[in-house]
Each structure stands twice: as structure tokens, then as C-alpha cells.
Image: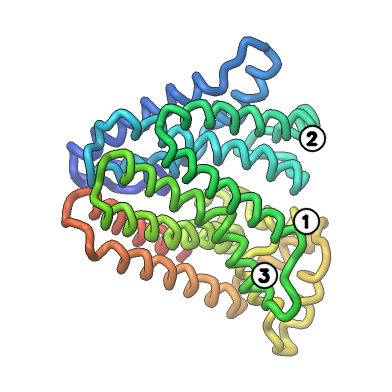
Amino acid sequence: MQLETGPFGLAVRDPALDQRIRKGLAEVEEVLRASARSDHPFIDETASHLVNAGGKRFRPLLTLVAAQFGDPAAPGVVPAAAVVELTHLATLYHDDVMDEAPVRRGAPSANARWDNSVAILTGDFLFARASQILADLGPEAVRLQAKTFERLVTGQINECIGPKDGQAAIDHYLSVLGDKTGSLIATSARFGALLSGASDQAVEVLTRFGEVFGMAFQLSDDVLDIASDREQSGKTPGTDLREGVPTLPTLYALESTDPESARLRQLLSGPIAEDELVDEVIAALRVHPALTQARETVTRYAAEARDLLAPLPDIAAKDTLLALCDVVTSRTV
């Protein structure tokens, strides 16, 4: 039997595990909605904006799967899963301000619907609510969240200031992604293992898995922004191009030196606003070796993440994590 749970149509073949994960995600959703509520009607509206918009809920899913290596019913697991999603949502409010993004998850972004100040403060409100939950999970959980938050901020700052002298643009980009995306996904897995009472080895393995898989997860989105159509990905191709956001395929293309790519490199070196130019760049990138390089990089990270799981016991949760590695690779083809 194959049941779909979580992002990407992930097939969870074990019915008992599927039931536990579904139940856990439903409980997480209740915590998220409760955490976004406020006695102040306007804050209630703004804080619920992205919670109600939905999303993959990948981070809490990973927390719940990692908890299967200990006691998945341990009382701290669901609250921790909610914490990582609240943290993720809070960063989205801030990211949309920095990127001047008009849309988030198919709806007007908070900064577009209200203004930048409201979006920033709403993100701060969700961070505060996450901290309230954390306070009941113990000092180790609080320290872990603090370290994660430091990395999230460090990654954002490094993205703003650009590569150091002598640092390759791609190396800088991967470093930023490690902090901005890999850190929170690693924490998602660590929370699940830690708060379920899993072994020390399992905690470390799952933390490292989350970090590496998080890179594959984000880089696969980079590929999809170029390679997929709207029906496949659910997002408009070239969104990152229009917003001027660097991605792995565009960085690889900018590194190319062949004369045939001169026009593409010229377009990628500046803002791309006109639809005709976006279409031209997408068409060029889809047949450029840069897209193949980007796919190979995703595959490499996914394979590393898969190999990291070897020491874990052979249970259904491990099969699910292995399947995630397969899905994150296949979705870029």
C-alpha cells in the first residue's frame, strides 16, 4: 500500500506510520493556528495570513518522521514541529520584505497587502510565539533554536553583502543556503530525534541528514524555477529571475565562457523585468549545460543525504527518508 503524506506526493508505504504522521501533522496544524491567534484583531489577521495559506509543512513532517527513531508520542514532538514551522513562516514575512515580493503561496504577500513594517513585525510576533512554546521544551531546545536563528540571520546578512574577496559566487551561494535553509531543516530533524528520546547516534545522523537534504531540497527548487511548467511545480517559471534572485542554474550559466552563451550571460547580469526577456532566458537555460550541472548538484547532495542514513535501524521511517532523497532528485528531471 502506498499512501501520500507531506510534500511532493511522498509515498509512505507503511500504513501505521502514515497514520501516525497524518495525526501528528493535524495536531501541528492546530498548534499553528492557535499560535497565530491574537486578542488584537489586526494582529490576528496578519499573523494568520501565511498560516492559512498552507504550504508544504515539510519541516514539521521531518520532525515527526525523525521522532519515529525514539518515542513518536513523546509530549515535546508536536510542539517542536510547530516551532520549526512558525520559525519558517516568520522568516517568510521577512524575506518578502527584503525581496519586495508581491505574492507568497498564491496570495498577496503581507508586505504587499499591508506594508513592510507590518510584515516585519508580524514575523517578529511569530518568532515570539515560537519562543513561548520553546520555553516549555527545556534549555537544550532553547539553545538549539538560538543557534539556528543565528545561522538564519548570518545567512541572510551574507546574502546581502555578497561573496568575500576571492570567494566564488557559487561557493558563496551554497554557504548562504546552508545557513538560510539547511540549518532549519537540520534543526527540524534534530528536534524530532532529540525530543523523542532517540539514541545519541540517531540524533547526530538525523541532524546531519537534515542539513544535507535541506541543500538538495532548496537546490531542486532552483532547478524547477527554470525547468518546470506551472502545472508541474505550482509556481510560475522564472519567478526567481523576475525577482533578481540568484539560483544555481543562473550562477553556473554566468560562470560559462563559451561564446554561444554571451547573450545569456549579458541578460543574467542585470534585472529581467520584461516577459519576453524572461521567456528568452528560460528557453536558453533549458538547453544550457548549466541546467544539467545544477541537476547533478542536486543529485550529489541527495546521494550524500541517503548515504548518511546507513547507520540508522531499518524501520519504516528510514524508508520514508530514503524515499525523500529519491523524490527530491526525480522532481528536477
Q: Secondary structure at mark 2?
A: helix
Marks 2 and 3 sit apart, C-alpha to C-alpha, by: 28 Å
- Residue at 43 percent across and 73 percent down: it is 300
Q: Which of the labelled discs sits on residue 250, or is there none?
A: 3
| Corner quadrant of residue 266 | bottom right
Q: What is the x, y in percent for residue 298?
A: 47, 68
Q: Dot 1, how many residues are within 10 Å of its Cα: few (below 14), some (14-19), or many (20+)? A: few
| Corner quadrant of residue 22 | top left
- Residue at 25 percent across and 36 percent down: it is 72
Q: Nearer the viewer, residue 58 or 227?
A: 58
Q: Amino acid at mark 1?
A: Asp
Q: What is the x, y in percent for residue 204?
A: 34, 57
Q: What is the x, y in percent for residue 203?
A: 31, 52
Q: What is the x, y in percent for residue 214?
A: 47, 57
Disc 3 vs disc 1: which is toward the camera? 3
Disc 2 vs disc 1: which is toward the camera? 2
Q: Dot 2, how many residues are within 10 Å of its Cα: few (below 14), some (14-19), or many (20+)? A: some
Q: Dot 3, how many residues are within 10 Å of its Cα: few (below 14), some (14-19), or many (20+)? A: many
- Residue that numbered label 2 is attached to: 116
- Residue that numbered label 1 is attached to: 275
Disc 2 vs disc 3: which is toward the camera? 2
Q: Secondary structure at mark 3?
A: helix
- Residue at 55 percent across and 63 percent down: it is 223
Marks 2 and 1 sit apart, C-alpha to C-alpha, by: 26 Å
| Corner quadrant of residue 91 | top right
Q: Amino acid at mark 2?
A: Asn
- Residue at 54 percent across and 44 percent down: it is 146
